[in-house]
Amino acid sequence: MSKMNLTRRGVIKTGAVAGAGLALPTYLSAAAHSGYTNAPTGDTVTLGFNVPQSGPYADEGADELRAFELAVEHLNGEGDGGMLSTFSSKVLDGTGILGKKVQFVTGDTQTKSDAARASAKSMIEKDGAIMISGGSSSGVAVAVQGLCQEAGVIFMAGLTHSNDTTGKDKKANGFRHFFNAYMSAAALAPVLKNLYGDDRAAYHLTADYTWGWTQQESIQAATEALGWTTVNNVLTPLAATDFSSYITPVLNSGADVLVLNHYGGNMVNSLTNAVQFGLRDKQVNGKNFEIVVPLYSELMAKGAGQNIKGIVGSQNWDWKLENQMGAKYAGTNAFVQSFGNKYGFPPSQAAQTCYAQTLLYADAAARAGTFNPCALGEALAGFEFDGLGNGPTLYRADDHQCFKDVLVVKGAENPEDEFNLVEIVEVTPTEQVTYAPDHPMFAGGALGSCNPGA
Amino acid sequence: MDAIILQILNGLDKGSAYALIALGLTLIFGTLGVVNFAHGALFMIGAFCAVTVQRILSISFETVDPTKTDFLGNPSKISTPYVEHWFGPEFGATIIDWSVPIAILFAIPIMILIGFVMERGLIKHFYKRPHADQILVTFGLAIVLQEVIKYYYGANPIQTGAPMVFRGSFDFGTLLGFDPNVIIYPYWRLVYFGFAALIIGAVFAFLQFTTFGMVVRAGMADRETVGLLGINIDKRFTIMFGLAAAVAGLAGVMYAPINAPNYHMGMDFLVLSFVVVVVGGMGSLPGAVLAGFLLGILESFASMTQVIDLIPGINQIIIYVVAIVVLLTRPRGLMGRKGVMEE
C-alpha cells in the first residue's frame, strides 16, 4: 500500500504549477521558440509526401499518394470531407491548416535510403516542406526520420513495420501511426494457437534487413511462448527472386509450419515457391503443414494470387473493417466512400495510414496554434483520438507509436472479386498488443529532444 | 542425401534460365561483338508476353448482378471472359488455363520483331564504338524497356499460372528408393528444364547442321574474310540478333509460372547472366551453357543451411567467388577462345 506525504508547502507549490498549466495549454510552452524550419509566411503551407514512385513498391507508393491528395483536398474544404466528419477532434474545419491553404510537393524514395533522404532534403530545402510523410520501407523510414530530426521538421511515417522505427531508432520529430512487428506477433500468436495448436515446429525464412530481423524476432518470441519450437531461421537476400533453394531444405526439416518474414515481391515469390513445392498439401508430424505470413497487404495478396488462399497474417487496417466489425471503426466507410468514388477501387492499408497521418498532423498544428514542430510534437504526444478507422487510438508519448487494435486476416478461399482477397479473421484489442516503452525489443534508443530547426 | 538431390534439381532449374539468357548474350556478342545489357529486358518482355496473352484471353464483358453489391454499395458487376462465352465455360476456362503455352506461339514473332527493331534501329549504330558505349546504350535501353512495362503493367508482380495439369509436384524420391514425399519437385520446373534443354539443343543444331549456321559460325570466327567472299554477313547477324531475342523471350515466357513476372525481373537475371558468360568464356556457346548450369548448381548448394552455417553469407557471394577463381586460373573462362576481347 502506498503512503502519501502531503505538506502545506507542497500543496501550494503543486497547485500553483497546475494552475499555470491549466491557464495556458501546455503545448504553447514550446511555441515560444523564436523560429523553426520553413515557418510558413504566406497564405499557404507546404507538406512533403515522400513515397516510392519507382522501384518495387511503386504501386503501394501510388496508393499512398492518392490518399495524400485526398487528405489535402479534404483539409482545404474540397470533396466530401472524408474522415474529417468522423474524426473525434473537431478543430479542422476545411479551411486548410491554421487558415493557410494546404499545398504539397512529392518526392520519390525509390525504396532506397539514400534516394529517400535526398528527395526529403530537396523538399525541405528547396520546396519549403514543413512536414515529410509517406514511404513503404522501414529502412527508408529510419533514414528519413533521422534526416527530419536533423532538419527540424516533423516526420509522419507511412508504411513502416520494423520495431526499430519507434524502438532503437525513434526520434522526437518522428511519429508512426502504422503498427509494428511486435504487435503483429502479439495479435497473431493466440490465433495461431487456436488454428494450429500449441505443439508446432516452425521454420523461418527472413528477409535480411531491419524489418525482417525484428519481424522474425517478434514472431519467434510470441510463438515460442505458445509452446512452439523454432527449427531454423534462414536469412534470405533482399534481392533474391527464386526461393526454391531456401524452400527445399524445409521439406524434410521436421518443421510443420513455415513462417515467411518477407514483404512485397519477396513474399509473393517465396509463397509461390512454397506452394509449388507442395508444402500446403504436406503432412508432417501427423499435422497439416501450414504457412504464416506475419505482415499482409492487399497488393501482396493480389500479387500472390491463388497461393494466398487460407494463409494467415496481420494488417493495420482493412477497408471492410467497419462493415464487418461495427461502428467502433467509424471513419472506415467514410474514407472508403471518398477514396472509392474518386479512384474507383477501395484504399489499401498504406493509403489509410497516410491519410490518417496527414489529418493527425493538421489537427495537431491546429490544436497547437502553430506549425512549430516542437509545439506540434507536444500536441501529438499522448494524444488520444477516434474516428480515423482504427477505433480508439493513443499516440504514446514515450515512443511516438500509435496503439490501436490489430487485424488478423487470411487469404479468402473464394474471393467475390479482386477487392475481397483478404478476410478478417479477428480483431485483436489494443491491450493485447501493447508493450512497455522499455521492452527489450525496442531498447537501445531514445527519443531525444525535439529539434525545431532554424 | 535427399537435400543434395533436391539442390541439384534446383541448380539445374536455375541453371536453365541462366544458360538460356547467357546463350543469347553469347550469340549476340559472338556475332555482332556487342555487349548487350538489354538482354535481361528481353527475358522480362518474354515473361510479359505470357501476361499479355493471359490478359487477352481473359478480356471480359460485364453484367450487373442486382443481388450483390460492390464495395461502394452499388450493384455488383460480374465479369465473364469472352472465350468462356464463345466456347462454353469449361473449354473457355481451359483456354485461359493454357495461356502460358499459347504465349509461346505469340512470343516467337513478337520477340524476333523486337530483336530486329533493336538491332536495326539502335544497336547497329554502335558496332564500331567502344564496348563502354555499347554497354551504356544497351543499359539505358534496358531501363527504358522496364519503365515502359511498369507504366502499362504496374510494379506489382502478376501471377501467371502454369496449366492446371502441371501444378503440383512429382515424387522423385519413390523412383530412387526414398520414402514418399521426401524428394518432390514441381512439375512445371521439370517442364522448364526440359524446355531449356530443347531450345539449347535446337540452337546448337541450327548452327551446326544448317548452311546458314555454318556461315554464321564462320562469321563469328572471321567476319572480314566471310564478307570478302561476297556473303552478306550483316543480314545474317541481324537474324541472329532476332534469334537471340526469341531465345531470351521464350525463356521468359516459360519462367512466368515459376515466379510472378515483374518489370524488374530482367535486371535480376542480367548481372548473373553476364557472370555466366564471363565464366563460360566470352563468345563460347558451350561455355555459356556449361557455366549456366554450373553456377546454378553452386548457387543452390550455397543456400543450404549447413553451408551458410559454415560460411555465413556465402549464398550471396558464391557466384562472384567462383567468377574470381575461374578468371584467376583460366583468364579466358572455362571454354573461352583466344583472341576474343583481347585486342
Image: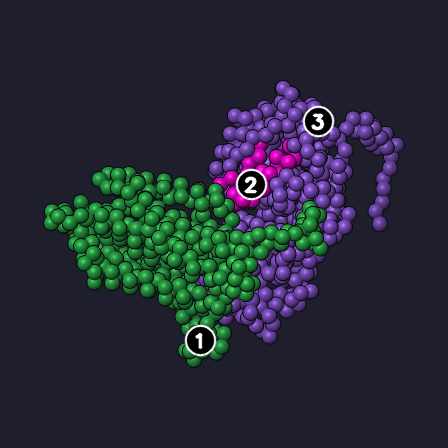
Residue at 45 percent of width and 48 percent of height: B263
Q: CA distance from mark 2 to mark 3?
A: 26 Å
Both labels 1 and 3 in a single chain: no
- Identify which residue is drawn at 64% across, 46% down: A346
**Contact check, label 2 and label 1, Cβ < 8 Å:** no
Q: Which one of the lettered chains is coloured purple?
A: A
Shown colour of chain B: green
Residue identified by numbered label 1: B173
| Residue A342 drawn above or below residue B293 | above
Q: Can you give x and y, in whole percent of width and height, for residue A156 in the image?
A: 62, 37
Residue A131 in view (yes/no): yes
Name the residue furthest front: B86
Q: Which residue is mark 3?
A: A95
The boundaries of the magenta stretch are A48-72
The quarter of the picture where the C terminus of chain A appears is top right
Report the amino acid beneath label 1. Answer: Gly
Side of A28 relative to B18 (left or right): right
Q: Which mark is residue A62?
A: 2
- In the foreground, B100 or A314: B100
Q: Are marks 2 and 3 on the same chain?
A: yes
- Three-letter amino acid code at the position of disc 3: Thr
Q: Secondary structure at mark 2?
A: helix
Residue visible at 46% across and 72% down in the picture: B170
